[in-house]
């Protein structure tokens, strides 16, 4: 678009002279930097893969038995001094997973984990990206891990005592519990982590049920996420499952 009014030197750029020999100025749209691929849902088949990994964790005697939810974008808005101060949330997620892995392995606990990243629409004033991590942790390690999460996030616990809650922060920025909201053990926890996979897909111009999603009634968590959206540790991944057959 040719600029006719006052120029803003920060956005105006010079182009070839016009037909009268005078240089024209146009405004370029500011570019939003996207460092990683963006997705709005989990890929097809993700919920099934998470559930298979959870079942395998029970088979090897290291069940996924705890669920940690971290409201990462909320922590960034609060200017947390934890791993969220580094900028991009996918970088923060990778750093957080590595901290948790080192903490568990250093205490002789197998690194058995499934995780997913989701997007919230604003419930409780906490819109944006949040993380779910399903971990294998013996009961006697629950308190120590919760204390460590408080340090990593710079968000102290509020000492809430509930049937399934191990600990949570004052500002509702993280929540550590013994099961998914609907219970049902490791497999149910995994199904909850896989809820943002589409329950319906388009085929031949029609909307049909996604038969590769075992629990299509579970929905939510859809929205823009940059970077990898879910993961499974090697101890319970596809290769480990194949080798155990």
Image: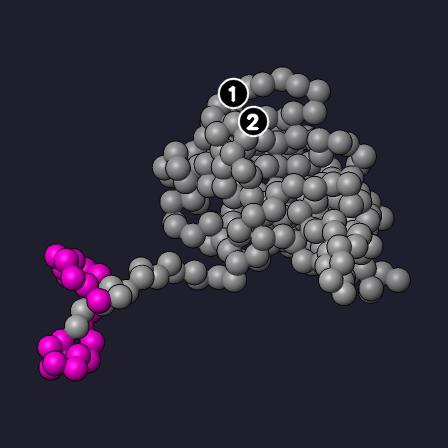
At numbered mark 2, what does the secondary structure look like: helix, strand or loop?
A: strand
Left or right for 62, reference 152: right
> Which residue, given by chain and number where applicable, does mark 1 sit on?
158
Q: Position of residue 141 (x, y in %)?
A: 65, 33
Q: Quadrant of residue 100?
A: top right
Query: Could you tell me which quadrant the C terminus lies in?
Result: bottom right
Can residue 138 be seen?
A: no
Spot the residue most to the front. Answer: 20
Q: Position of residue 172 (x, y in %)?
A: 51, 27
Please check the rendered image and state whether residue 170 is part of the magenta-colored stretch, yes or no. Answer: no
Pointer 1: residues within 10 angstroms few (<14), some, or many (20+)? few
| Along the line of sight, the residue nearer the viewer: 69 or 120 | 120
Which residue extends farthest right? 245
Residue 188 visible at all: yes
Instruction: Decide which of 164, 13 is in the foreground and name it.
Output: 13
Disc 2 target residue? 168
Q: Which residues are magenta?
A: 2-23
Q: Do the residues under discs 2 and 1 have CB atoms within 8 angstroms?
A: yes
- Where on the picture, by quarter, is residue 65? top right
* Apparent side of residue 92 relative to residue 142 in the rendered image (left or right): left
Residue found 63% across the figure and 52% down from its top: 41
**Residue 155 lies in quadrant:** top left
Q: Could you tell me what secondary structure mostly forms the magenta stretch? A: loop
Which structural element holds mark 1?
loop
Q: Earlier in the sequence, mark 2 or mark 1?
A: 1
The relative height of residue 71 versus residue 236 in the rendered view (above or below) is: above
In the rendered image, residue 146, in percent from the top left (x then y), is placed at 57, 31
Q: What is the quadrant of the N terminus in the image?
A: bottom left
Residue in view at x 31 percent, y 60 percent: 30
Judge by depth and name the residue closer to the eye, 242 or 121. Answer: 121
């Amino acid at each position: 678009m040719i600029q006719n009014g006052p120029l803003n030197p920060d956005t105006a750029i010079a182009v070839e002279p016009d037909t009268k020999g005078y240089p024209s100025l146009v405004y370029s749209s500011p570019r939003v930097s996207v460092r990683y691929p963006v997705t709005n849902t989990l890929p097809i088949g993700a919920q099934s893969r998470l559930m298979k990994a959870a079942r395998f964790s029970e088979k090897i005697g290291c069940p996924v038995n705890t669920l940690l939810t971290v409201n990462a974008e909320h922590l960034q808005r609060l200017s947390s001094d934890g791993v969220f101060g580094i900028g991009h949330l996918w970088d923060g997620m990778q750093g957080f997973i590595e901290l948790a892995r080192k903490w568990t392995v250093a205490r002789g606990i197998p690194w058995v984990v499934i995780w997913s990243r989701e997007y919230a629409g604003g419930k409780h004033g906490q819109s944006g990206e949040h993380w779910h991590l399903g971990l294998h942790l013996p009961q006697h390690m629950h308190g120590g891990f919760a204390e460590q999460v408080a340090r990593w996030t710079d968000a102290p616990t509020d000492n809430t005592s509930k049937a399934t809650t191990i600990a949570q922060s004052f500002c509702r920025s993280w929540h550590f519990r013994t099961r998914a909201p609907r219970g049902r053990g490791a497999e149910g926890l995994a199904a909850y982590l896989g809820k943002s996979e589409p329950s319906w897909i388009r085929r031949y111009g029609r909307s049909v049920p996604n038969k590769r999603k075992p629990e299509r009634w579970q929905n939510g968590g859809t929205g823009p996420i940059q970077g990898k959206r879910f993961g499974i540790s090697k101890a319970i991944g596809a290769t480990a499952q194949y080798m155990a057959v």
